[in-house]
């Protein structure tokens, strides 16, 4: 029996590792396709892109791992069934449930690792990935001055190069507009030719210009009537240095991102949730007292202009009719303004409470996600293993179709439950456990079918099942009709 268990385990580990990295690679390519515009043309070193892909791959494990478990278990038992090895195992006295035992133990251990990964490794990976992606997206494009184009990516300068030599250094017809004084085009440099070089540390751009002119127009020449001449300086050789430090990628501090709910473990999430709930309750108490106090004020009618002793007529039921027309208009306008003010304040308060509720929901969703990932691996295994034994097809053909279909349904239900939890339609616990609750009975049914060699998945079985249901209702309908006839007689 140990040899059988070892054989089944080895048959599972190969497809498991292969499908996991294939799924990870596909998700990584999707990520690169999404953010390719933020990376191209910025001159990143290879190790920065490698770090980004490494941390991004770690964040994709919650998607890739359940899919790999589902596909690998389906392929393993599909291969065993296709080559009649599963029949031989059963003939040797080993039931399907016992054959699943070594893989079930392995999946339990894998689920434990998935929980540890979600709670301890994934928050760190999310933090590193989020900070690095933010810095990459904020970085300006690398220096790339093309011929005949006014290049304005350098703050304070606009540069135009008429022609550039293939060596990338020799240039001609150079125009440099200096805007560092923020006074417009008052300082310009034109040169027939020159050289453009960058220091080894890539922090300074050096222009060595030949046979040109510097033009400077004083600001006073524009704003005053006094006529100051335009200054023009001719030079045979001139060197201009431009600072390129703004083009370097600035590393953000991780402390700015570490309080995000995706960067927290279970204990940190628990503290954050308790703090947010306490803040929400405190805010509700403050606003409840405010509205209770101001509602009484807004609900009163201004009666300062009414004196019952000097009233020309007795007090009427319609209170406002006791005032003159101008006073009635004033009272109505005040009441409308107070009502509008109260309506706006309640609207702002409602939006504030919705935002606080959604923030709390996101933290609770992330808390439950630590558990649902590991449990999803277990549930999908009990779907994939018996399904592979039933369809008896291995390889990457039919198993891929079935596993992709099941995983898409699982993922759609998971995203729907998470969305309902964020919007307050469901509680976070209900939304996050929804796919597992739906798929767990399916896994139990498939496991029972495969272990008992039942024909529950065959078309004939379902046809007979529905015929029995129809006949059952027909009999009930006939009995009710006969009782109704006897009662009438």
Image (cartoon, rainbow, N blue to C red):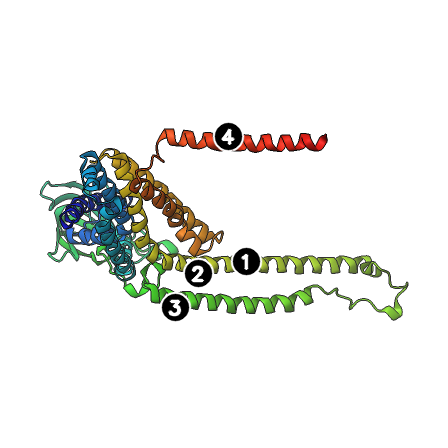
Q: Counting other residues with Cα less than 10 Å from the Cα at mark 3, is it few (<14), some (14-19), or many (20 or more)?
A: few
Answer yes or no: is residue 145 visible: no
**As drawn, 210 above or below 327:** above
Q: Counting other residues with Cα less than 10 Å from the Cα at mark 1, is it few (<14), some (14-19), or many (20 or more)?
A: few
Labels 4 and 3 touching (C-beta < 8 A): no
CA gap between label 1 and label 3 equals 25 Å
Q: Which mark is residue 360?
A: 2
- Lower position in the chain sequence, tag 4 or tag 2: 2
Labels 1 and 3 touching (C-beta < 8 A): no
* Residue with the mark numbered 1: 350
**As drawn, 475 above or below 249:** above
Q: Secondary structure at mark 1?
A: helix
Q: Which is nearer the eye, 245 or 303?
A: 303
Answer yes or no: is residue 292 visible: yes
Q: Locate residue 426, reporting x and y percent.
A: 47, 52
Q: Which is nearer the eye, 149 or 101?
A: 101
Q: Counting other residues with Cα less than 10 Å from the Cα at mark 4, is it few (<14), some (14-19), or many (20 or more)?
A: few
- Lower position in the chain sequence, tag 4 or tag 3: 3
- Lower position in the chain sequence, tag 2 or tag 1: 1
Labels 1 and 4 touching (C-beta < 8 A): no
* Residue with the mark numbered 3: 271
Q: Which is nearer the eye, 8 or 298?
A: 8
Foreground mark, 4 or 3? 4
CA gap between label 2 and label 1 equals 15 Å
- Lower position in the chain sequence, tag 1 or tag 4: 1
Q: Give the residue drawn at x 34%, y 67%.
A: 267
Q: Which mark is residue 229?
A: none
Q: Secondary structure at mark 4?
A: helix
Q: Which is nearer the eye, 384 or 406?
A: 384
Tell me where residue 289 sits by quadrant.
Answer: bottom right
């Amino acid at each position: 029996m140990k040899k059988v268990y070892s054989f089944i385990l080895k048959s599972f580990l190969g497809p498991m590792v292969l499908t996991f990295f294939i799924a990870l690679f596909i998700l990584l390519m999707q990520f690169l396709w999404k953010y390719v515009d933020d990376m191209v043309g910025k001159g990143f070193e290879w190790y920065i892109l490698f770090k980004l892909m490494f941390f991004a791959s770690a964040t994709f494990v919650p998607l890739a791992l359940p899919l790999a478990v589902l596909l690998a278990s389906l392929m393993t038992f599909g291969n065993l069934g296709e080559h009649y090895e599963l029949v031989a195992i059963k003939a040797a006295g080993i039931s399907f449930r016992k054959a699943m035992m070594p893989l079930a133990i392995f999946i339990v251990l894998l689920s434990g690792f998935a929980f540890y990964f979600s709670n301890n490794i994934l928050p760190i990976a999310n933090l590193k990935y989020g900070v690095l992606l933010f810095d990459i997206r904020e970085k300006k494009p690398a220096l790339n001055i093309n011929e005949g184009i006014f290049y304005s990516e350098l703050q304070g300068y606009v540069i135009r190069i008429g022609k550039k030599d293939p060596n990338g250094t020799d240039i001609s017809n150079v125009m440099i507009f200096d805007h560092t004084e923020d006074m417009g085009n008052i300082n310009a440099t034109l040169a027939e030719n020159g050289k453009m070089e960058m220091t080894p540390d890539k922090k300074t751009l050096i222009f060595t210009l030949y046979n040109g002119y510097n033009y400077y127009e004083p600001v006073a020449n524009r704003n005053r009537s006094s006529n100051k001449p335009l200054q023009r300086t001719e030079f045979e050789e001139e060197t201009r240095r431009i600072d390129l430090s703004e083009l370097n990628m600035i590393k953000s501090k991780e402390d700015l991102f570490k309080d995000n709910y995706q960067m927290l473990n279970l204990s940190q999430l628990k503290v954050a949730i308790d703090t947010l709930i306490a803040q929400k309750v405190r805010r509700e108490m403050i606003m409840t007292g405010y509205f209770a106090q101001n509602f009484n004020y807004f609900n009163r009618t201004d009666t300062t202009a009414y004196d019952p002793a000097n009233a020309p007529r007795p007090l009427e039921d319609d209170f406002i009719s006791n005032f003159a027309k101008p006073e009635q208009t004033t009272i109505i306008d005040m009441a409308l303004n107070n009502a509008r003010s109260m309506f706006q304040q309640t609207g702002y308060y409602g939006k504030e409470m919705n935002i606080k509720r959604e923030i709390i929901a996101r933290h609770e969703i992330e808390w439950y996600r630590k558990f649902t990932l590991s449990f999803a691996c277990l549930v999908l295994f009990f779907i994939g293993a018996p399904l592979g034994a039933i369809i008896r097809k291995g390889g990457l053909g039919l198993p891929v179709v079935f596993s992709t279909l099941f995983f898409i349904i699982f993922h759609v239900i998971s995203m729907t439950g998470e969305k309902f939890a964020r919007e307050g339609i469901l509680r976070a616990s209900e939304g996050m456990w929804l796919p597992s609750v739906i798929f767990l009975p399916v896994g139990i049914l498939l496991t029972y079918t495969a272990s008992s060699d039942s024909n529950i998945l065959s078309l004939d079985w379902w046809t007979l099942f529905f015929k029995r249901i129809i006949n059952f209702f027909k009999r009930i309908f006939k009995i009710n009709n006969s009782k109704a006839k006897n009662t009438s007689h």
